[in-house]
């Protein structure tokens, strides 16, 4: 059990470092990095504080602490993926609306240029 929790600790530390370097290099926007940092920090805390993990394990009703940690972690990452899917969908819709507005402006500009001639 401790070996698995140590691996989880290492994974969460790697995730924290990756997110911080990505923010520093402007590969990810700070407002999106906050959720990743919170998720990685929570995973790190749960893998190191055995009392809290055991409390959550009992509340969920699972027999194993690492199983509870991976269930909670997996659920959090599924929720994060859903959140980012919603954000990407909104950005796609905004891009379509922007392209349509640009096309309308180009058409009006072209019409004005034709009227001047």
Image (cartoon, rainbow, N blue to C red):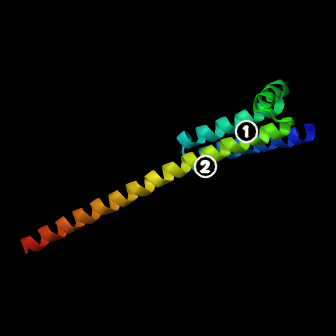
Image side of residue 68 versus residue 16, left or right:
right
Task: Find residue 59 and report its image quarter.
Answer: top right
Q: Is residue 75 visible?
A: yes
For the N terminus, the quadrant is top right
Which residue position holds label 2? 81
| Rendered position, 56 above or below 87 | above
Q: In the image, is 66 to the left or to the right of 27?
A: right
Q: Is residue 98 shown above or below 64?
A: below
Q: Residues within 10 Å of mark 2 (few under 14, many from 20)?
A: few
Q: Earlier in the sequence, mark 1 or mark 2?
A: 1
Near-viewer residue (115 or 77): 77
Rendered residue at 79%/38% (across/down): 69
Confirm whether residue 17 shows in the render: no
Residue with the most extreme front position? 61
Residue 110: x, y in percent? 18, 70
How far is disc 1 from disc 2 in space, using C-alphas?
Answer: 14 Å
Q: Label 1, on which residue?
A: 72
Q: Position of residue 75 (x, y in %)?
A: 68, 43
Q: Secondary structure at mark 1?
A: helix
- In the picture, the disc for residue 47 is none
Where 97 sits versus 53, above or below?
below
Q: Residue at position x 50%, y 53% from top?
A: 88
Q: Using a 10 Å C-alpha cutoff, classify the residue at mark 1 as few (fewer than 14 neighbours), some (14 to 19) or many (20 or more).
A: some
User: Contact, CB < 8 Å: mark 1 with mark 2?
Assistant: no
Residue at the outermost left position: 116
Q: Nearer the viewer, mark 1 or mark 2?
A: 1
- At horizontal 34% and vertical 62% (from top left) the residue drawn is 99
Q: Nearer the viewer, residue 113 or 41?
A: 41
Judge left or right: residue 5 versus residue 25.
right
Q: Splitting the image into 4 quarters, where does residue 2 fall?
A: top right
């Amino acid at each position: 059990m401790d070996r698995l929790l140590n691996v989880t600790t290492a994974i969460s530390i790697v995730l924290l470092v990756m997110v911080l370097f990505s923010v520093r290099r402007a590969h990810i926007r700070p407002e999106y990095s906050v959720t990743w940092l919170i998720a990685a920090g929570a995973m790190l805390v749960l893998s190191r504080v055995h009392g809290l993990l055991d409390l959550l394990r009992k509340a969920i009703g699972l027999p194993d602490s690492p199983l509870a940690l991976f269930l909670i972690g997996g659920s959090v990452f599924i929720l994060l993926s859903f959140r980012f899917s919603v954000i990407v969908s909104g950005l796609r819709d905004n891009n379509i609306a922007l392209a349509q507005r640009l096309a309308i402006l180009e058409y009006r500009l072209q019409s004005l240029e034709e009227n001047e001639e």
